[in-house]
Image: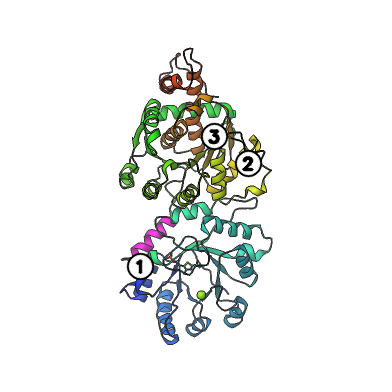
């Protein structure tokens, strides 16, 4: 019978000095297994056969002691010689069918797959598991065929899930390439996303070389990775499930209204930090707006202070307005800090599609961490959709490409927004005359607001500032928190614009800040004067 294999934390060894250093391979593997590695692959591309067999024997003893399976990379003969649990075969190695004949039905045979086609072929040939990659570029393997990212891995998982044959459902999967303690939780979280119409399929584990093999203390490194894999990620919503209005036996409208009023109060009473990494032009307005809603703004583009700021239970806005290499390096540090602390991050992909540099910046940021909310106008969100691997060609024809006119009708926009949110497993907001917001399950159109907002520099960026504060103050239902922030913002704009003395966007700005403030105070005090009804 085939042994049961736990693929959760899959260690691939490396004997090169660059990674192993002066440490002893067998020692390192034993420590790693003690730390929580669940399966080991001995990978050695350069040693002679006699050394391979000798080392494999020692490794097998260690693995057997800890009841962890040992596989050999490439060398079926070595696996046969030491009678370990199986092999891992790359695309250039022995074909799976041939290896199966030599090893028999009970041995584990894994295969590398970088594409849907390779995955299908390996499953048909009888692979027990697939090592899918390369996820991220990694110095450990420089001859990688293709860097496929989260999207590439998702596509393969999705294809497996949509096949009817049982073999596709049974095959196990691990991803490989550049996985380490700073990204493992996000990688797993985003592979969990139900990205297609068929049932979701999750990944069974992560395969790791350098984050364990190169560590000073391989046991500690393995045990930290194991804990990160097991623990819920800090950025997961703090309640288990979104609260649905029908469960509360309320109508939807009044549920959102109640949630919004509670959220306004939560922001006012906790004064959450809204940490903005944004461009000079909008800093002043964004800070004043944050103060008006009762949040506590800080404008800091220095990635090195993000880890201290992330401890203050606030939210972060990453505004791509100035996507220089310097700024991006700072963004990456801050993203890691907030993801680790669980503080919400709002991504504002300003001008995402406008230049090649901005498209690259968007891809870089999306690979840098988990964003709780991505907000942008129609073109920006379309760019995010593309970067997220969402195939727009599968959707109805665009209507036109004129200036600010909507490219898609409302229903199409709602579809795109909800699918991107599902893929990214977050909240996506597409702003416009009608805003569309979704968490992949619930999708809403918000019709509040005023055209003057579009004539004020930085009003879109400042909405990000507000949303980060709202999501920090209300960490349970992220979608409702974001809707509350939007509603506060847009209703204040309506109230401001309707004042008698407003002549245009210039006089509108101070009135808008006043109304943001008055709405907040009104809700907190229950004043007649400041009363406003969301929606
Ligand atoms: N195979 P690290 S990537 C051995 O894509 C290997 O098939 C890959 O090393 C593939 O965990 C890789 O240090 C190296 O990034 C992964
Ligand atoms: Mg190989």
Q: Is mark 2 on a helix, strand or loop?
A: helix
Q: Is residue 66 left or right of residue 434?
A: left
Q: Where is residue 210 in the image (x, y as percent from the top left)?
A: 39, 66
**Could you say which disc has been placed on residue 214 in the image?**
1
Q: How crowded is mark 1: few (under 14 residues within 10 Å), some or many (20 or more)?
A: many
Of the numbered discs 1 and 3, the one sitting upstream in the chain is 1
What is the magenta range? 217-229
The location of residue 103, given as percent across then percent down, is 57, 81
Q: In which quarter of the image is the C terminus?
A: top right
The secondary element bearing badge 1 is classed as loop
- Label 3 within 8 A of ligand 1 by Cβ: no
> Disc 1 vs disc 3: which is toward the camera?
3
The disc, 2 or 1, on the residue closer to the chain's N-terminal end is 1
Mark 3 neighbour class, 10 Å CA radius: few under 14, some 14 to 19, many 20 or more: many
- For label 3, the residue is 431
Q: Is residue 199 visible?
A: yes
For the point 52% across and 67% down, which residue is it? Answer: 145
Magenta stretch: residue 398 in it? no
Dominant SS of magenta comes to helix
Quick check: is the Cβ at mark 1 less than 8 Å away from ligand 1? yes
| Disc 2 target residue | 415
* In magenta stretch: residue 225: yes
Task: Say above or below: 491 vs 104.
Answer: above
């Amino acid at each position: 019978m085939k042994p049961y294999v736990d693929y959760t934390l899959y260690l691939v060894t490396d004997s090169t000095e660059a990674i192993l250093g002066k440490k002893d391979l067998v020692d390192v593997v034993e420590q790693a297994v003690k730390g929580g590695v669940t399966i080991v692959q001995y990978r050695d591309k350069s040693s002679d056969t006699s050394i391979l067999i000798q080392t494999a024997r020692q490794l097998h003893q260690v693995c057997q002691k800890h009841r962890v399976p040992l596989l050999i990379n490439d060398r079926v003969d070595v696996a046969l010689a030491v009678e370990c649990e199986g092999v891992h075969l790359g695309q250039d190695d022995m074909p799976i069918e041939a290896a199966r004949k030599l090893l028999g039905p009970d041995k584990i045979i894994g295969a590398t797959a970088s594409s849907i086609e390779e995955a299908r072929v390996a499953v048909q040939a009888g692979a027990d598991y697939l090592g899918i990659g390369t996820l991220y570029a990694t110095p450990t393997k420089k001859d990688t065929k293709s860097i496929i990212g989260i999207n590439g891995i998702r596509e393969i998982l999705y294809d497996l899930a949509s096949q009817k044959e049982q073999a596709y459902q049974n095959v196990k999967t691990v991803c490989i390439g550049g996985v380490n303690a700073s990204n493992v939780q996000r990688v797993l979280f985003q592979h969990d996303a139900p990205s297609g119409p068929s049932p979701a399929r999750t990944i069974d584990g992560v395969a790791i070389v350098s984050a364990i093999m190169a560590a000073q203390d391989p046991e500690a490194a393995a045990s930290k990775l194991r804990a990160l894999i097991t623990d819920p990620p800090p950025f997961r919503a703090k309640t288990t499930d979104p609260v649905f209005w029908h469960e509360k036996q309320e109508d939807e409208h009044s549920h959102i209204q109640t949630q919004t009023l509670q959220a306004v109060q939560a922001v006012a009473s906790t004064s959450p930090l809204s940490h903005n990494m944004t461009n000079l032009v909008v800093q002043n307005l964004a800070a004043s707006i944050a103060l008006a809603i009762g949040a506590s703004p800080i404008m800091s583009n220095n990635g090195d202070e993000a880890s201290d700021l992330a401890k203050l239970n606030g939210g972060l806005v990453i505004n791509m307005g100035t996507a220089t290499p310097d700024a991006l390096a700072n963004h990456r540090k801050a993203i890691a800090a907030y993801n680790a602390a669980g503080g919400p991050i709002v991504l504002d992909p300003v001008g995402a599609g406008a230049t090649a540099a901005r498209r690259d910046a968007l891809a870089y940021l999306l690979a840098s961490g988990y964003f709780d909310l991505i907000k942008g106008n129609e073109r920006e969100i379309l760019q995010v959709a593309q970067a997220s691997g969402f195939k727009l060609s599968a959707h109805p024809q665009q209507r036109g490409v004129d200036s600010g006119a909507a490219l898609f009708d409302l229903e199409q926009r709602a579809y795109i927004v909800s699918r991107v949110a599902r893929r990214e497993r977050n909240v996506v907001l597409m702003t416009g005359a009608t805003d569309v917001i979704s968490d992949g399950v619930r999708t809403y159109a918000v019709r509040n607001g005023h055209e003057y907002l579009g004539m004020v520099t930085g009003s879109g960026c400042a909405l990000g500032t507000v949303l980060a504060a709202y999501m920090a103050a209300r960490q349970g239902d992220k979608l409702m928190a974001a809707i509350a922030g939007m509603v506060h913002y847009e209703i204040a704009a309506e109230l401001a614009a309707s004042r008698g003395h407003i002549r245009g966007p210039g006089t509108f700005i101070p009135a808008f800040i006043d109304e943001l403030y008055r709405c907040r105070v009104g809700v907190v005090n229950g004043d007649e004067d400041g009363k406003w009804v969301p929606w």
